[in-house]
Image (tube, coloured by chain):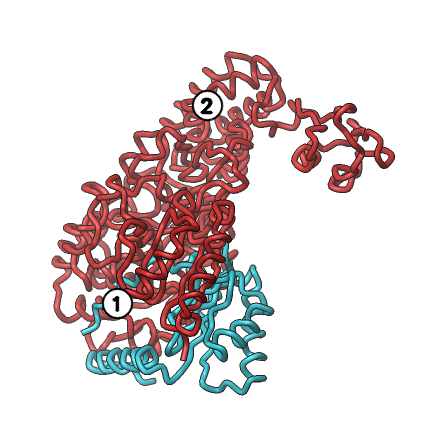
Chain colours: A cyan, B red
Amino acid sequence: MAKMTLDDLRKLRDAKRRELDMRDAENKTIQVIVGMGTSGIAAGAKDTLAAFLTELEQHGLSNVSLRQTGSLGLDHAEPTVEVRMSDMPTVIYGKVTPEIAEKIVRKHILGKTLVNDHIYDRPAADIMEGTKE
Amino acid sequence: MGFQHYILVCGGTGCESNKADEIFRHLIREVEEQKLDEKVQVVKTGCFGFCAQGPIVKILPEESFYVNVVPDDAQELVTEHIVKGRPVERLLYREADSKKHARVDDISFYQKQFRIVLRNCGFINPEEISEYIARDGYAALEKVLFEMAPEQVIDELKSSGLRGRGGAGYPTWMKWNFTRGAEGERKYVVCNADEGDPGAYMDRSILEGDPHSVLEAMAICGRTIGADKGYIYIRAEYPLAIGRLERAIAQAKEYGLLGEGILGSDFSFDVELRLGAGAFVCGEETALLASIEGERGMPRPRPPFPSVKGLWGMPTVINNVETFANIPVILVRGAEWFGRIGTEESKGTKVFALTGKIKNSGLVEVPMGTPLRDIVYNIGGGIPDGKQFKAVQTGGPSGGVITAEHLDTPIDYEHLQELGSIMGSGGMIVMDETDCMVDVTKFYLDFTVEESCGKCAPCRVGGRKLHNILTRISKGQGVPEDIDKMRRIGRAMTKASLCGLGQTAPNPILSTLRFFQAEYDAHINDSLCPAGKCKDLVHFEIITENCIGCGLCARRCPVLCISGERRQPHEIDQERCIKCGECFAVCKFNAVLRA
């Protein structure tokens, strides 16, 4: 990446925003987002991430992007995982051990049913929602 | 195709004990009877908070939040909400009157938190700059470079009312303005990421989850005050945050958002990390600067303040991580928007690290002025194991306690100070009936005595003296005069210590004396620790008549000092007992006596 000018920055912002929106709207891609802050990792998020990798591979799910993010702040429920996909509400799962990761792939992503006992409430609305032109 | 609706039933322990399970079964039956099982899934969830108003039922995708639901409501919820598509008004959560401080209208009404600082944490990949950019990242820097004059930036900060989030609450615009006006060959921007309060980790989470927001704000500060160099002083114990920051700095340089001629302008700004070795005193600004310069981390008298003579004698702005993370949002959304959140004197939000005896521990960001009760009971879900709430400790070793009678106090800088505590960096440790105030206070004094740099006598000697007295009291060897003596030493330290560490070190004592003097008196006069925590004042015995010889306590005892035949009364070997209280907690027959 060469150094950007103001124009480049604006173009990049629009392009990336569209890309993220597209993922949300049309949901060509299913997103599995694992919280990888210190508290998540301490609670075993690395094992959870590895379990998702194995599980997604086993089911040949190449349309799923596995991403990482910082801490949501739900420390009592770490490791936390957010699942975004079409036809399903966006859900935050907590206390996601490798076994629960396997369940999420099988039930939520393939079976389109929510997994019992592991759903948590998103702590706050996104203040960035609705600011996009 | 997934389902059309999802009915989520809270499965937290609080809701479970209020028949959440029965609600769950009723809902499933109702859904089956009305032949909706292809359209609706009923799910049990983890704890949603709001436990005092449980059981909670939430319906997706409408996000309807129902409280105080009873099993008989199941039919109405399914018939009305699902079939007829209209919410059951009487069960919907309504915000209590006490919470009607300035709120932003576009936030749905049951949201517990309002996240400005943590806006990106848990949303973006912190190792990918483009995701930050997509969420308005570096848009504030754009504005500052191409549309706003430095004076306008300061005016905007002034009218936003932003105050420092590191503890003291000094208006941010004033720091920037002083430094901008000060004479110096070079100026510096410093980010204080030396988060040292026990139980506080909000800065770590911000840097791990959204490092660019701090880098962007530092560049904005540099442009505004006329600095081309910034330092982030961060503790070496935060390896993940350091790694993410290093990556973020490298990416920002690669994209031309840090370095020479940012975005084609004539402004250059560079950020370097400086790792601290974990000395608490280095969170004090003058000690922090000394440490960056490679000197021993000790404070010096102020004035001159860092805004006049800071790093290497040059004018310097020092802000805390959380303060910086607010700035890009303020400049993009405008001061007016920010000013609508919070109270008259304290604008915006504050992030708290909620820990201790609380069900849902974690990071909480709420508008200033939110009552403590909301944080503890709604967001935190209350105290676990049915125990009684005793107090919340805020401000760490520099702060004090807030008791049950002050639970409705709006949390902001002024109110906390009135109660003898401080906002501090935002640690919030919840304590229940089993916590002894003398013991807790001793813990904080252990900490400040250990962390005192030793430069000034009031802190070095006074802290040690206070600690000695507390230790005596906790052993039942205190005398009534100790109370007054502690108050006197405390006042002297507050007045005469060189820096914030010593000035605030007596706060935990002064504050607990104010609200819990009876507990000190019990230790001193009756050699009694009411909470049963002070090891020298408590002993455990097995009441022979009550003991059925189940052996549970013997198996739980970590030092194996309980013995006895099966089905025969057991005995505790007092010599070896470490007074951990495990046997007392585990016995189901009230056969363990704590005295």
Does B33 appear above or below B170? below
Q: Which quarter of the figure has residue B231?
A: bottom left
Nearest to the eye among marks 2 and 1: give it: 1
Residue drawn where x is 56% and y is 68% of the image: A100
Residue type of the residue flagged with mark 1: Glu
Q: Few, some or many C-alpha atoms within 10 Å of disc 2 (few <14, some 14-19, many ≥20)?
A: some
Q: Residue B112 got which mark?
A: none
* Residue B308 locus on image (x, y percent): 25, 48
Query: Can residue B312 be seen?
Result: no
Q: The residue marked by circle 2 belongs to what chain?
A: B
* Residue A98 locus on image (x, y percent): 59, 69
Closer-to-camera residue (B452/B242):
B242
Does B403 appear above or below B280? above
Closer-to-camera residue (A120/B363):
A120
Q: Few, some or many C-alpha atoms within 10 Å of disc 1 (few <14, some 14-19, many ≥20)?
A: few
Residue drawn where x is 18% and y is 62% of the image: B333
Q: Residue furthest right?
A: B565
Closer-to-camera residue (A73/B398):
A73
Residue that mark 2 sits on: B516
Circle 1 — which element?
A: loop
Residue that mark 1 sits on: A129
Instruction: Point out the image quarter for the C terminus of chain B.
Output: top right
Residue drawn where x is 49% and y is 33% of the image: B388
Circle 2 — which element?
A: helix
